[in-house]
Image: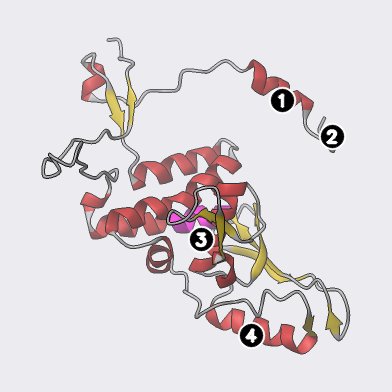
């Protein structure tokens, strides 16, 4: 039984786990006794995301679905938010949302903020990107400042890159509803007070099934526009300055060295 601190049974099960052989993807290569490669293509990623959800691994499904725009935007040379706006039909907000993120507000300001949020899209490409950063880097729904190392300065120093200011939400939760048609479950604020509110922050809750469904449709559109996109991203890199004009073959995918016995 789970306690306030941790789930002891779960920890014990993790510690004693023995890896299980997963079902192999049958290919000409491994049927002939050779290794086969499982490519990290957009279609494969969304399929494994759906499989993870179907078997109850919702954290794995969430983490994977949030990184698919990273993969796809690298393939078409754009960026996360641009790709999400085009293929997931999410709007892109106009400018900073620092005013909406202020902790003290009046009822009038809250009404004005929500009017602005609703006009630009209750859940935008910027919100999705901030959820991705929080989940992937911190395993959290708190939308805060990102810490990135400044390569041009002392490596031991860090500077703040406040990408969170483009989202009005301080928290973006994730829930399950069983209905894949809706992307959002709810949105609102948790301010304390009547006329003058303190500790007022906006939040929303995303429907995981809806996000997976929309991502699947986006990936389908992305691939149908150009079937060559359904591949794993790679780049040519020189081994040294002297042979920088010579392309180097890069390793792709996950290699399955098991063979299928006839």
Q: Earlier in the sequence, mark 1 or mark 4?
A: 1
Neighbourhood count class around disc 2 (C-alpha, 10 Å): few under 14, some 14–19, many 20 upward: few
Q: CA distance from mark 1 to mark 3?
A: 31 Å
- Specify whether residue 212 is painted magenta: yes
In the image, taking residue 40 as reference, residue 111 lies left or right, namely right
Q: Which residue is mark 3?
A: 129
- Specify whether residue 8 is painted magenta: no
Q: CA distance from mark 4 to mark 2?
A: 42 Å
Nearer the camera: disc 2 or disc 3? 3
Could you say whether the residue bearing mark 3 is in a helix, strand or loop? helix
Q: Are marks 1 and 3 in contact (CB under 8 Å)?
A: no
Q: Earlier in the sequence, mark 4 or mark 2?
A: 2
Q: Which residue is mark 2?
A: 3
Q: Are marks 4 and 2 in contact (CB under 8 Å)?
A: no
Q: Which residue is mark 4?
A: 115
Could you say whether the residue bearing mark 4 is in a helix, strand or loop? helix
Q: Earlier in the sequence, mark 1 or mark 3?
A: 1
Q: Is residue 13 above or below residue 98?
A: above
Nearer the camera: disc 3 or disc 4? 3
In the image, taking residue 219 as reference, residue 234 lies left or right, namely left
Q: Which residue is mark 1?
A: 11
Q: Is residue 106 above or below residue 48?
A: below
Q: Majority secondary structure of the magenta segment?
A: helix
Please state the extent of the stretch shown in magenta in the rendering.
Answer: 208-215
Q: CA distance from mark 2 to mark 3?
A: 33 Å
């Amino acid at each position: 039984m789970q306690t306030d601190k941790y789930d002891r049974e779960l920890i014990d099960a993790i510690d004693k786990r023995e890896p299980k052989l997963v079902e192999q993807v049958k290919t000409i290569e491994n049927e002939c006794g050779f290794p086969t490669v499982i490519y990290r293509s957009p279609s494969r990623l969304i399929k494994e995301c759906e499989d993870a959800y179907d078997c109850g691994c919702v954290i794995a499904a969430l983490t994977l679905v949030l990184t698919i725009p990273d993969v796809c935007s690298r393939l078409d040379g754009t960026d996360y938010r641009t790709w999400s706006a085009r293929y997931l039909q999410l709007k892109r907000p106009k400018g900073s949302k620092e005013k909406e993120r202020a902790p003290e507000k009046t009822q009038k300001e809250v009404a004005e903020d929500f009017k602005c949020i609703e006009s630009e899209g209750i859940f935008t490409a910027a919100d999705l990107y901030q959820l991705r950063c929080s989940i992937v880097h911190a395993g959290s729904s708190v939308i805060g400042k990102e810490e990135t190392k400044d390569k041009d300065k002392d490596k031991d120093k860090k500077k703040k890159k406040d990408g969170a200011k483009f989202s009005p939400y301080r928290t973006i939760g994730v829930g399950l509803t069983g209905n894949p048609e809706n992307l959002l479950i709810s949105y609102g604020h948790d301010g304390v007070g009547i006329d003058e509110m303190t500790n007022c922050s906006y939040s929303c809750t995303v429907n995981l099934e809806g996000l997976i469904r929309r991502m699947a449709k986006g990936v389908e559109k992305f691939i149908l526009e150009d079937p060559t996109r359904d591949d794993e991203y790679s780049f040519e890199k020189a081994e040294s300055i002297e042979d920088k004009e010579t392309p180097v073959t890069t390793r792709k995918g996950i290699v399955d060295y098991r063979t299928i016995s006839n």
